[in-house]
Image: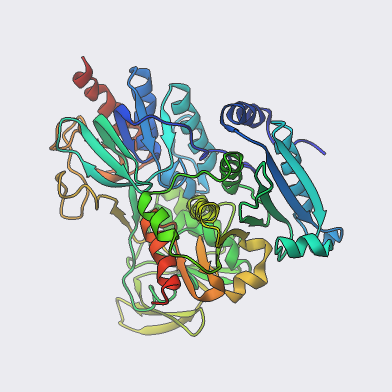
Amino acid sequence: MAALLSEEDRKYLVDLFEKELKGEVKILFFGSKRKEECEYCDLTEQILQELAETNNKITIETHDFDETDLVKKYNIEMVPAILMLDSEGNDMRIRYYGIPSGYEFSSLIEDVIATSKKGEVDLSASTVKKLEEIKSPLKLQVFVTPTCPYCPRAVLMAHKLAMKSPNIIGEMIEANEFPDLSMQYNVSSVPHIIINEGEGEFVGALPEDAFVEQIMSVVKGV
Amino acid sequence: MPLFNLSNVSKPKETNYDVAIIGAGPGGLASAIYAGRAGLKTIVFEKSTEGGQILLTDMIEDYPGFVSISGNALAENFLNHAKTFGANFTNEEIIEADLVSKIKRLKTDLGNEYTAKTVVIATGSNPRKLGVPGEEEFMNRGVSYCAVCDGSFFKDKRVVVIGGGDSAVEEGLYMTKIAKEVTLIHRRDKLRAQKIAQERAFKSKMKFILDSVVTEIGGSKSVEYVMIRNLKTNEMTKYPTDGVFIYVGLIPNTQIFKDQVKTDENGFILTDEHMETNLEGVYAVGDVRKTPLRQIVTAASDGAIAVIDMTKYFD
């Protein structure tokens, strides 16, 4: 199959990763043997393989959705799914459900860099303090479309919070690939962020403070 | 649109600059190109994805040199051009600005502080809300301001587009490729969009309801109808639809600057002919500025004029 990455983008990534990657990054990809159930699994796997070829610190491990133990371990809900482990095997608690194409490809790259730094991310001091108040599991689902220029900001915010707080899972969900789930949450305008499966929700790529405020109002039950 | 887009991967950064450009639409990116060429140390702040509102446009046909180019591709050209001449980029939102002092200070949503000797405000504008009952309530259930972002949720469904300008007509045309039915509702008896876009719309499957305004967006779980009032007859019609796309004008993004720079009554920033505001070393370019025309070509032109003038502070 022809390369998905243009030669120009490939070179850009080689340079960027050369400068930015600190430690190893293991990307776990979950696909499905039943192709009819996963239209974008092949394409997702291929772009990850091409990504891995740009720097030897990045490795890809491919799994099938029927590998129950692993699926259970990482709580994978649907495919295609992507997650990242740092050099010590720590789960960064970020998930991509659906292909990270279009503008979301940038999110994936940012996540690879952050994972290579063991989840070291740029968040304000006040956010870090608020995150310490989160003591129970919290799930952030960010519904996106690949053509939405506002969406990566919301995805990266959810992922950064997940990397920083051991209780947060941050997910990107490509809305078009999971129409039933999108319908369940009435997604019709993206980014649409669902907190704890419906305890809270908001639409739009809010600045950091406002984003965290939305989460904290759910955490505090107000 | 490239299948895999890398435009908003941000780069490492310093905190002191000659020029800080807030916003990476055509005005900001043109400023960055000229600033880079002038040898000024430049940083561009973008809160979402570099390119600005042109990313929301399917095809562009009125930027000289390109008979037809996707908004996405043009944005990428602008961005790569600016990067070639050395501008730095960061994906942070400015939440506080001191533009009055000689050295300008900018604080971002990530808690970082930057300084710059000059500032270019290129923050553009946001879609204006219609301000009718149901708009807020159905914001995430059928109401949208971005056809490229949300269009795919309305595949084979019925949508209405509100407005009569370039955005309404062009985004409406985009939706005719996705939706089963597209109806454009406009308060005047004719459209305001460029003639060529109008002609295409009339030839497409788009339907038109003119001389009419939407007074309410309604439904149970999601949008099911809009109430339309004919301004000539005052007749009210309940019009069934699954989606509402609103393009009724723009609100400038000047919230955090408006206590410092002078604006008109609508919030658009006032500048002199060199794009300088009432504050020394603070410029405004593109859609955010009070200007008779808001196009990619005029935003780019503003950027060039601003930066050439700005060099006086670095002689």
| Rendered residue at 45%/40% (across/down) | B50
- Residue B13 percent coordinates (x, y): 42, 31
Camera-side residue: A2 or B297?
A2
Q: Is residue B130 above or below residue B99?
A: below
Residue A147 drawn at (x, y percent)? 56, 51
Left of B136 or right of it: where is A164? right
Looking at the image, how many numbered discs can be counted on the residues? Answer: 0
Residue B295 figure quarter = top left
The C terminus of chain A - image quarter: bottom left
Percent x, y of residue A152: 52, 50
Farthest residue, direction top:
B315
Q: Identify the residue at horizontal 39%, vertical 25% (top origin).
A: B33
Q: Quadrant of the N terminus of chain A?
A: top right
The image quadrant of residue A130 is bottom left
B145 relative to A196, above or below: above
Question: Is residue A207 among what the camera can see?
Answer: no
